[in-house]
Image: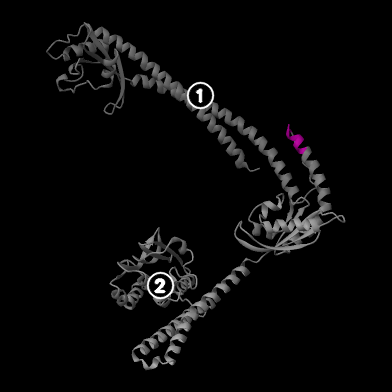
């Protein structure tokens, strides 16, 4: 056991003891100070009552001289206050220059009862002052107030002296307790160190080691138990080591998840691949139904239990993530005719399923995309051959339509080849320090006229202090061109803005428009090949459904991240984080 543990225990108890004694000290000194102030308050109240007998509250002349004579008798500052709060006399100041005292706390308290008290700190003198006001009544009415005030410097000095004595006593107690605790903890640490060394030696395979403790008290029983355990462990490990090693090698070499259960379906052994397959959970001890929650698998398990024959099932697991797998379950029998358990092997076919689905989608999409223009070309060609060639006006339109569809096919093939080249590494992204302003000007030159035709504004935002960025210039222009072109296509009013910005300390490229927006349910699928939010409109505008897919591949090739935000009717913003 590390020395730090005992040090923390010692510090913890020392802090607890210190806090307890500190709390006691604060309580005692506070109570003594309050008691002293209370006694002083009672004394000043009595003196104020005696002084009030000789105070002429109806006198029109200031009573400063009378207040000074009373101060000589009481050794306290004396203030005579009229019933309305006006200061009639003060022993320390000219009463005619003093503010009305009606709002003073001690005067307000005296007005409600008979005696009021307040303690206020004097910034000028640097210590607290006690104010005691006594209400003087005559004939059922308030004549005025007599207020006495004294400083609490002597009271605070007495309290500080008491506090110093308590601190000295506390320090002595802590020192003695600390030395005693340190001695006991050090003894305990030596015993636990011996036990730790013994446990470490046993864990490392030294099963012949014995533990002997001196002056250990209760630890003697622990030492005896540990010695007995060491002997029994040595005997048990000698018998099982070879079998365990053999099983461990077998389980670790199996690439698929393998679970072995007893007859009740409780998992007893799991291969190392099972942890990755079913999540980082402890599998042994769990029921099959807790790990594999699928009806097809449970039906297979019942079938194997009933027929005593191996079986295979294909199903989908939802947790810890969606997986398609094939499971083969075989009965485990130690006695003929009796199922003692089950061996289940799970093979992950998720990637095969995904590839199969991608292939199906790709074939369906490419067939649809190519079939539409080919059908149009064939139809208009047949129309021309059937006599429309003689109709010059319509023949030209038909030929233009054929040309447009052939260009559409050519554009589709070009985009497919671009994506394939990126995936195959034929198109390499070679980063270098480039000026973003230069790439932005290129995009503006290419698309400014297209935006002007739709009465849209197109502007680039280039920070003034921007230096260079690491990117492939041609690919960067291609990314921005595709995004800005898309934005122009789907924006009817307003405009499109692109450029560079910064968000939470991360530099990013952005393209923002005021267009029709994209419903939230479609955002996760943007960038898939041939995926369109509005397929009919996109085709009418000449889109192939591959523009965002190309952007997504080029962004990934740069090692960047792309994020799309959109609101229907308000517009779309695409961010590409480059840092």
Q: Which mark is residue 537?
A: 2
**Image quadrant in which you'd find residue 8:** top right
**Image quadrant in which you'd find residue 433:** bottom left
Residue nearest the observer in this picture, 325 or 65: 325
Q: Which residue corresponds to the image point at 30% horizontal and 9% vertical from the top-left?
A: 46
Q: Quadrant of the C terminus?
A: bottom left
- Position of residue 349 relative to residue 7, above or below, is below
- Position of residue 206 relative to residue 227, above or below, is below
**Image quadrant in which you'd find residue 158:** top left
Residue 303 location (% of width, % of height): 76, 58
Q: Which residue corresponds to the image point at 67% horizontal and 51% vertical from the top-left?
A: 290
Task: State if disc 1 and disc 2 touch (CB < 8 Å).
Answer: no
- Which residue in the protein does label 1 denote? 169
Magenta segment: 215-223
Q: Which residue corresponds to the image point at 66% horizontal and 42% vertical from the top-left?
A: 1
Q: Determine the CA span between mark 2 and mark 1.
A: 89 Å
């Amino acid at each position: 056991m590390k020395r730090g543990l005992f040090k923390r225990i010692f510090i913890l108890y020392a802090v607890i003891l210190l806090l307890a004694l500190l709390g006691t000290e604060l309580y005692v000194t506070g109570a003594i100070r309050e008691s002293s102030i209370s006694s002083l308050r009672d004394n000043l109240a009595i003196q104020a009552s005696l002084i009030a007998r000789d105070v002429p509250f109806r006198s029109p002349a200031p009573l400063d001289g009378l207040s000074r004579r009373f101060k000589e008798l009481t050794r306290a500052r004396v203030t005579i206050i009229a019933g309305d709060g006006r200061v009639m006399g003060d022993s320390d100041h000219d009463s005619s220059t003093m503010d009305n005292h009606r709002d003073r706390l001690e005067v307000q308290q005296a007005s409600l009862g008979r005696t009021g008290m307040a303690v206020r700190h004097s910034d000028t003198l640097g210590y607290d002052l006690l104010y005691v006001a006594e209400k003087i009544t005559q004939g059922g009415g308030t004549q005025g107030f007599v207020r006495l005030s004294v400083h609490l410097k002597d009271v605070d000095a007495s309290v500080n002296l008491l506090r110093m004595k308590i601190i000295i006593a506390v320090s002595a107690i802590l020192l003695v307790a600390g030395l005693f605790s340190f001695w006991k903890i050090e003894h305990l640490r030596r015993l636990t160190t011996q036990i730790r060394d013994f446990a470490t030696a046993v864990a490392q395979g030294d099963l012949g080691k014995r533990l002997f403790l001196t002056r250990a008290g209760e630890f003697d029983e622990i030492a005896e138990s540990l010695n007995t355990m060491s002997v029994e462990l040595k005997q048990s490990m000698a018998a099982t080591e070879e079998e365990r090693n053999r099983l461990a090698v077998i389980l670790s070499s199996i690439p698929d998840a393998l679970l072995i259960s007893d007859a009740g379906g409780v998992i007893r052994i799991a291969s190392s691949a099972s942890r990755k397959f079913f999540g980082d959970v402890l599998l042994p001890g769990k029921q099959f139904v807790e790990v594999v929650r699928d009806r097809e698998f449970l039906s297979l398990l019942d079938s194997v239990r009933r027929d005593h024959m191996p079986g295979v099932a294909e199903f989908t697991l939802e947790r810890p993530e969606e997986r398609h797998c094939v499971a083969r379950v075989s009965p485990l029998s130690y006695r003929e005719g009796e199922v003692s358990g089950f061996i289940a092997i799970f093979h992950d076919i998720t990637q095969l399923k995904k590839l199969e689905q991608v292939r199906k989608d790709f074939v369906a999409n490419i067939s649809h995309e190519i079939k539409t223009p080919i059908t149009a070309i064939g139809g208009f060609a047949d129309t021309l051959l059937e006599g429309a060639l003689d109709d010059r006006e319509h023949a030209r339109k038909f030929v233009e339509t054929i040309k447009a569809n052939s260009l559409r096919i050519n554009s589709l093939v070009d985009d497919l080849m671009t994506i394939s080249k990126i995936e195959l590494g034929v198109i390499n992204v070679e980063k270098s320090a480039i000026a973003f302003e230069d790439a932005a000007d290129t995009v503006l030159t290419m698309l400014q006229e297209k935006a002007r035709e739709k009465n849209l504004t197109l502007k680039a935002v280039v920070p003034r202090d921007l230096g260079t960025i690491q990117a492939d210039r041609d690919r960067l222009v291609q990314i921005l061109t595709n995004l800005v072109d898309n934005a122009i296509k789907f924006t009817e009013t307003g405009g499109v803005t692109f450029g560079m910005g910064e968000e939470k300390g991360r530099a990013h490229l952005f393209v923002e428009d005021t267009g029709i927006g994209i419903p939230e349910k479609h955002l996760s699928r943007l960038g898939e090949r041939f995926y369109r939010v509005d397929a009919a409109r996109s085709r009418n505008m000449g889109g192939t459904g591959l523009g965002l897919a190309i952007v997504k591949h080029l962004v990934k090739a740069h090692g960047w991240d792309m994020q799309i935000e959109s609101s229907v009717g308000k517009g779309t913003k695409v961010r590409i984080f480059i840092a």
